Amino acid sequence: MRKILIVAQTEFEALVRSKAFIAGVLLMPVMMGLSVGLTRATRRVADDRDRTFAIIDHTGVVSAPLVALARMAGSAALPGDGRADGPAAARFIPVEVKADGRHPDDLRVELSERVRRGELFAFVEIPGTVLDPGGDARIQYHSDHPSYATLPTWLRATANGVIINERFRRAAVDRTLVTRLIKQAPVDSLGLFERDASGRVKPAEKVDDARAFGVPAAVLFLMFITIMTSGPALLNSVIEEKMSRISEVLMGSVTPFQLMFGKLLGSVSVSLLLSAIYVAGGLAAAHYWGGYASAVTVSLLAWFVLFLVMSILMFGSVFIAVGAACSDLKDSQGMMTPVMMLLMVPIFMWVPILKAPDGTMATVMSLVPTAAPFLMMLRISLAPGPPLWQIALSAVLMAMTTGVAIWAAARIFRTGILMQGKTASLGEMVRWVRAS
Amino acid sequence: MTQAILLRGVSKRFAGTTAVGDLTLAVPSGSIYGFIGPNGSGKTTTLRMIMRILLPDEGEIEVLGSRDAAAVRDRVSYLPEERGLYKKMTVRRLLRYYGRLKGGTLPELDRAIDSWMERMELRGLHDRRVETLSKGMSQKVQFIAAVVAKPSLLILDEPFSGLDPVNAQVLKDAVLDIRRGGATVVFSTHDMETAERMCDRIFMIFRGRKVLDGSLEAIQAEYGADTVRLRTAGGAAALAGMPDVQSVNDFGQQQEVRLTGDPQLFLAQLAARTAVYHFEVTRPSLQDIFVRIAKPATEPCEKS
C-alpha cells in the first residue's frame, strides 16, 4: 500500500505540473470567454451589407406597403442591429418590378440573371391568390444564397403582416379587436408551495431556466471534461514509461498492480482537484451572478464525487490497458476511438433525458455503467431526482464494472508493459486477461 | 557461505522456444558475478527471472534466502539494459522516487543522493530536468537510481555499455565499492576484459543453457593451456600448413594460436620456418573461450 501511495503521489505531482492539467483548468473559462466575446464582437460586423431585392407583386397591393415598411424600419429589420448607434447596419431595399407585358417566365429569367450578376440579392414573387383566405398560395423567394435566412424570415413576417391586414380590410373586420379577442393567457412555470419556520406560506418561486437546466448541464459537462482530461493523461504516462523502458526499472521495485493502482489513485486525486477548482469557481460565479449556489446541494456533490471516482477508476483502467497494449502513441489513437465513442454516447443523449428524466430510456441508460456517471448524475441534478434505489443500483452496477475493469486492465498491464515493438491485437489482449 | 541467488532447474519458454533451460546457479553473497553470453542466449531472461519480473515455468529461485519476491524486493536493485528515465522530472525528484519505491526515507535518501551525485561527478545537477542531461550523465543518474537505496543485491544488465572510458571507470569503481560494502553484484556484459578483471566468478549462458560457471582460474584450467601467443618475422603467413594448429587469431603483429599438440614441438617446427621474436604459452583468454563456445552457432542465430 505504501508503494501504491508513492506511485500515486508522484503521478499526481507529474500530472498537476503537466500542461494538460493547466489546459484542463483553463479550457472551459477561456472557451466560454472566447465564445461570448467573439459573439459580441462579430454581431455588428457579421452582416453589414445592404440587400436589394425585386418584388413581382401579382396582387398589386402588397408591394407598396412592403417598400414603405422596409424604408421606415430601415435596418431594424435585422435583429439586434436596428439601433441608431449601430455603426454599419444593413438594410433591406425592396424594388417593385412590373411585368409590362412581358411573359412571366421571361421576367423570371431576367431577374435571375440580375441576381447572378450581383445587381440584385434576390427576387420575390407574390401570387395574386395570396389574398384569398381559402387558398393555399405561397410566396416564392428566389436567391443564390440559400443559406441566408434573415431576408426570407423578414419577408415572411412583414409580407404576411401586410397580407393579413389586407384580408381583414376586405372582410371588413376590425383587426385590433380580433387581436384582443384571441390574446392568449400565458403559463407561468412555478415551483411548489411550502411553509417557512414561522408557519407562513412561502410563495412558490418561478422556475428559473438557469437553475433547472444550467446546473444539470454543468454537472454533466464537468464530469465529461474531468474524465477527458485524466484518461488520456494516464494513457500517455503508461506509453511514456513503456517506450522509454521505465516500466522495467519500476518492475524491479513494485508489482504491476501496485504501479497501475498507484497511477489510478494519482489520476483520481487530480480529477478531484480539477473538479474542486471548477465547482468552487462555478459556485463563486453562481453566487456573484444570481444566487444560484443554493441549487448545488451536499448530496449532489457527494454523488458527484462517488460517480467521478468510480468513472476515473473504470475509464482509467481502460486507458491504462490501451496504453500497455500499444507500442507507440500513434497506435493508441486507433485503439482509443472506441473508448472515446463509448464516452460520447451519453453526451448525445443528454437533451432527450433532460426533457424526460423519468422516462424509460433515461432510466435504462442511466443504469448502464459506462453511461451512469453522466446520465445518472444528470438525473440526480434534475429535480425531483430519480428514486434512491435507482441511484444505488446504478452505483452498485458501476462499482462491479469498475472492479472487473481494474482486474482485466491489471492483467493486460502486467503483460503489456514489458512487450516492446509490437501493438497487441484485441485477441491477444483477451488472451492476456484469460492467462493465469 | 550463504547464497545471494540460488536457481534450481529453472526453465522459461516463450511461445514454444526455450529461452532458458534447466538452469542451476548459485551466486555467493558478497561476490561479483559476471553473466556473459551472445545476444539472445538468455541472459536478460535469467536476470528478469531473478527479479521476478518473469516467472519461471519450472524450477525454483531463491533470492537473499527467500522464495517470496515481495519480501526481499526492497533489498534488490535492478538496472535493465534498455533503461529510461522520466524526461520531465528533475534529477532529485527522480532519484527520490526510485529510492522511496525501494523503501528509503527522505532524509536518508537525500544524503545518499548528495553523496552519489558528488561521487559520480554530477555536482549541482540536482534540479536539472532529465531531458537536459547528456547521455553519459543520464546513464550515471540511472546507476544512482539503482543504488541510492543501498541494495544488498545489485543486478546490472550491461551497465558499462555505451559509456566513455572515463565514465566507465567511475562506474566500475563504484561497483567495486558497493561490493566492499558487503553487497552482492551480478552484472551481464559483452566486454570480456571487464568480466575477467572485475568478476570473482563468471557464468556463461549459451542458447539458454549454462556452459561456463566458476572462477576465471577454474574456467581457464578447464579449457587448458593450449594457446600460444607469438610474434614472428613471417607473421600469420608463416603458420600456414603447420601441423597441430587448430585455429589462428591474427592481430597483425601478433598471433594467438590454439594447438592440439605439444607447444614445445610446435616451437621447434616454427623456429625452423621463421625467426621467432616472442613465444608465450598462455591460458586462453575469456574472449577466446567465449568465441570457441559460441562461434560455430552465433551467425545463423541472430537475435530476433
Image: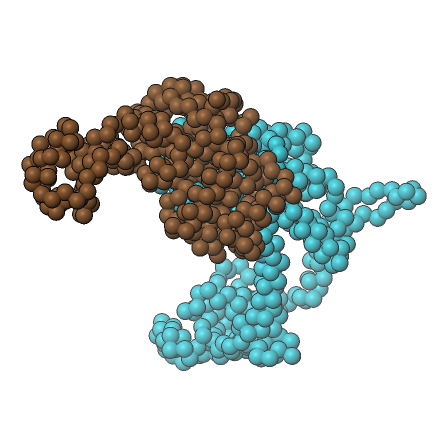
Chain colours: A cyan, B brown
* Residue sitting at x 48%, y 62%: A137
Figure quadrant of residue A396: top right
Q: Is residue B283 above or below residue B278?
A: above
Tell me which corner region of the image, top left, top right, bottom left or bottom right, holds residue B227.
Answer: top left
Q: In which quarter of the image is the C terminus of chain B?
A: top left
| Of the pair B121 and A158, the residue shown nearer to us | B121
In the rendering, at what x and y percent does residue A133 appear?
55, 61
Q: Which sits in the foreground, B161 or B15?
A: B161
**Is residue A436 positioned above or below A321 on the image?**
above
Residue visible at 46% across and 67% down in the picture: A141
Q: Position of residue A330 (x, y in %)?
A: 40, 48
Q: Is residue A111 above or below residue B103?
A: below
Q: How many marks?
A: 0
B208 relative position to A12: left or right: left
**Can residue A143 be seen in this snapshot?**
yes
Task: Indicate whether A348 appears above or below A251.
Answer: below
Residue at image location 60% in from the left, 57% down from the top: A26
Between residue A219 and residue A164, name the one nearer to us.
A219
Q: x and y percent of residue A253 in the render? A: 52, 35
- The residue sitting at 77% across, 48% down in the picture is A294
> From the viewer's perspective, is A15 left or right of A192?
left
- Asked whether residue A4 is in view, the answer is no
Which percent across, then down, holds residue B151?
Answer: 53, 34
- Compare residues A54 and B293 and report the one nearer the observer: B293
Relative side of B274 to A372, left or right: left
Q: Which residue lies furthest to the right in this view?
A: A198
